[in-house]
Structures are given as structure tokens and as C-alpha cells.
Amino acid sequence: MLARDDLLDFLADHGVQQTTHDHPAVFTVDEGEEIKARIPGAHTKNLFLKDAKGQLWLVSAEGHARIDLKKLHTVIGSARLSFGNAELMAETLGVAPGSVTAFGLLNDSGRRVRFVLDRTLAEAELVNFHPLTNTATTTVSQEGLRRFLAAIGVEPIVVDFEAMAVVEPLAR
């Protein structure tokens, strides 16, 4: 599995400019409020999920978005959703609980995980994710996020969590 330095090298190799801020480990959205206040851009919460048919899902939403897991499956076309376990998360995304991140999709070489991206993040000028560890935050531009996703061959399902509806896919 690739680690933080491998991710940063990958971003550089694909022309994605980034800024990485080191900080103490953060395990929840609320825990990192003081840290996030010093880092510009949209901040995220990330959920690793598994549906009743075994499909894996990664949901990246703006940190304060309300995600109704009882309704989300009807929006994204999945079976009922529940949280995936730590072993499966490590196996597919190469991260531990507290470090879940869209950048983990880099480790999903088998493309077992479908990606759901919050519309707020899809439209934000700057977006922040953990760089495969919860002891840092990496900021990329919207163009950089799109370039990263294109480089790994991932097309997100963009969801407006306020309206609980799928919106147009990301423009390339």
C-alpha cells in the first residue's frame, strides 16, 4: 500500500499542486476544528461504507454536511448502506479509521470502491483531505482534485446532500 510520501509524489508527477500541513492526529470532524480554522478551503468528512450486496463506497462530504444513510442508498442506486470495517478499509484504501480520505482511492487498484463526492466539494476552489494519515491535511485546488481523480480513473457520483439528489458529473 502507498503511504503519504508516495501520494505526494503521485500528485507531483501528475501536476497537482498541493500544500500539506502537519498537525496532531485528528480522529473526528469536531476534533479538528481548531486546526481547520487555520487551513483555507473546504474541509471534509469521509465515510467508508459497504452496501448489503457487498459493494464498497467512499463518501467525501463537506465537514458539516448532514448525510442521511437511510436515504442515501436510494440516491446513489446502492443497496442499504452500513459502515465498512477497519480491515476492509485497510485492504482497499490503505488507511486506518480516522484517516479515511479520497486520496485513499489511489490504493484501490482493483477499483472495488465507488466514490461519492459532495456537490459542495465538487464546486469548492480549494479542498482538504488527509494524505493517507490523520496527522496532516493536504490542500488541492478543484482542478487538482479533478486531475487526481482522472489520473486514477475514478469518476465520482456527485451528490447534493441538501437536496439528496445526484447532480451532473464533474466536468473534465
Image (tube, rainbow, N blue to C red):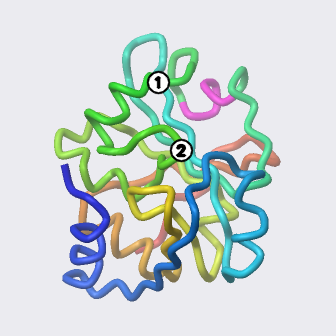
Distance in Å between CA atoms under marks 2 and 1: 13 Å
Residue drawn at x 29%, y 44% as measured from the top left: 94
- Pick whichever, 72 or 84, lies toward us: 84
The quarter in which the C terminus is drawn is: bottom left
Marker count (numbered): 2
Above or below 82: residue 130: below
Residue drawn at x 52%, y 16% as measured from the top left: 79
Where disc 2 sits, the SS reads: loop
Left or right, 78 with respect to 163, comes to: left
- Pick whichever, 169 or 26, lies toward us: 26
Residue drawn at x 38%, y 23% as measured from the top left: 55
Counting residues from the start of the chain, the first of labels 2 and 1 encountered is 1
- The percent coordinates of residue 101 (x first, y second) are 47, 53
Above or below 68: residue 143: below
Q: Are marks 2 and 1 in contact (CB under 8 Å)?
A: no
Q: Quadrant of residue 3?
A: bottom left
Q: Which residue is mark 1?
A: 84
Please identify, in this view, whether the residue under mark 2 or under mark 1 is nearer the observer. Answer: 2
Q: Quadrant of residue 34?
A: bottom right
Which stretch appears magenta? 72-76
- The percent coordinates of residue 154 (x first, y second) are 33, 55
Q: Report crowding for label 2: few under 14, some 14 to 19, many 20 or more residues within 10 A (C-alpha).
A: some
Residue 45 drawn in magenta? no
Q: Which residue is mark 2?
A: 98
